[in-house]
Image: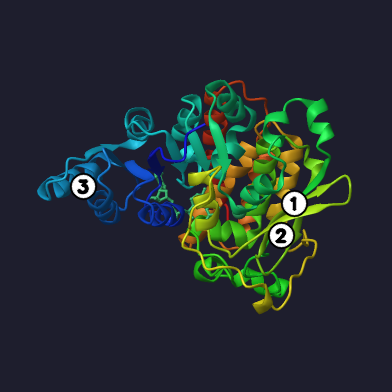
Amino acid sequence: MTNSLQTRHLCILGSTGSIGMSTLDVVRAHPEQFKVVALTAGQQIERLAQQCLEFKPAIAVLSSAEDAQSLSTLLQGKGSSTQVLYGQEGLITAVEDSDCDTVMAAIVGAAGLLPTLRAAQLGKRVLLANKEALVMSGDLFMNAVRKGGAELLPIDSEHNAIFQCLPPQFMSAKHTPSMKELLGVEEIWLTASGGPFRNTPLEDLASITPDQACAHPNWVMGRKISVDSATMMNKGLEVIEAHWLFDLPLEKIKVLIHPESVVHSMVRYRDGSVMAQLGQPDMRTPIAFGLAWPNRIHAGVAPLNLTQLSGLHFTEPELKRFPCLALAFAAAKQGGTSPTILNAANEIAVAAFLSGKLPYLRIAQVVEATLNHLESKQAQSIEDVLESDRKAREAATTYLIQA
Ligand code: NAD
Ligand code: MG
């Protein structure tokens, strides 16, 4: 285990996004503990440039060669020695060659899979925000973590809460059924805010706009995950994420709507105990937890004041209101490449919705049609996963056109 005084060398995949910027916010407050060695973004040249000038990473990556050239010119003009790379190869190089020991996986969607997997194979500490990567590749990813000797720490607030509520031996006992049995975990309860449309009359859902869908009541997040929260596909992806992270059967993973977003998730034990993790809805808490684990550092988050809460409420989700959640449950149960197909079709449908090309209620229909159209298989390799992702994107795109 790393001693507490050692400086962690950090590669942030997706540094210009909501999670990436919150990570840098925590890092900024602890300059002696963290050194940023690689930063990556899709297309946000200016924001990445500012980050490079502030944190001086060895490597920066953008998606396209043109943008990388612009960033490189800009940085050289300011006397920066950051090397600028591009594309998936650039992301892999950032993980392999930046001298990082810790990788924050905060790219949104399937684009984050290969660099995150590489970090796992190389035995890094992997701070996993990019749930889509794990949903797509399931046991292949978890095998890479085991084989590579990586330290996988969940950043998704619910999974981070579960991780904190499990006994420390749980993660090491995960694959030893008799040891795991002794620890008495009966169920985990993932909480969900229910998003902005929890109480919207069903007949009004047809005319939802992207801005309405992205106006989350409690959390400030990137646009894709905000839409996923509104449809509750996010919670469906999180059920699959929890299944792999904690090696628990789907029957032991429950979803509860909890509109206040204060209880971030819970574990129910055999003896009647229920352990919960509470906190402000601020991702800097799980990010700081992952960065400093097993120590605790200040995250810049205001203390939770229980006396100011109006109450804590919990209800079961209505699957009629949230058909994406039902589709995710079904894909999880089906197994094989169904979660990969679900995720790819959802990415295509959400992108179309966000660009005004698909009505809100058609998101679930596109995902369902794609799942029905493609056969689920057992993926033997990452190439199989990528092939399934590609086919699902193609199929989903044809269902968009039929909309
Ligand atoms: P975001 O859209 O704000 O940021 C995404 C980042 O990925 C940006 O830096 C963007 O430039 C980069 N990116 C996007 N497409 C890319 C591509 N094709 N190639 C390379 N880089 C690309 O998203 P976010 O809200 O920060 O979410 C990031 C991940 O964390 C998602 O998987 C999300 O589900 C997960 N997550 C987010 C939150 C949250 O509160 N924001 C909470 C839990 C989990
Ligand atoms: Mg979450």
Question: Mark 2 touching mark 1, by CB under 8 A?
Answer: yes
Amino acid type, label 1: Ala
Q: Is residue 344 visible?
A: no
Q: Residue at x 35, y 55 (%)?
A: 28
Please name whichever residue, 127 or 86, is drawn nearer the observer in this view of the structure: 127
Q: Residue at x 62, y 25 (%)?
A: 379
Estimate the spatial distance between the alpha carbons at disc 1 and disc 3, rounded to whole Å. 43 Å
Query: Mark 2 sits on what residue?
Result: 322
**Ligand 1: does it lie within 8 Å of the C-beta at label 3?**
no
Estimate the spatial distance between the alpha carbons at disc 3 and disc 2, rounded to whole Å. 42 Å
Counting other residues with Cα less than 10 Å from the Cα at mark 3, is it few (<14), some (14-19), or many (20 or more)? many
What secondary structure is found at the residue carrying circle 2? loop
**Ligand 2: does it lie within 8 Å of the C-beta at label 2?**
no
Query: Mark 1 sits on what residue?
Result: 326
- Quarter of the figure with residue 361: bottom right
Q: Is residue 216 visible?
A: yes
Q: Nearer the viewer, mark 1 or mark 3?
A: 3
Counting other residues with Cα less than 10 Å from the Cα at mark 2, is it few (<14), some (14-19), or many (20 or more)? some
Assign the C terminus to one quadrant of the image. Answer: bottom right
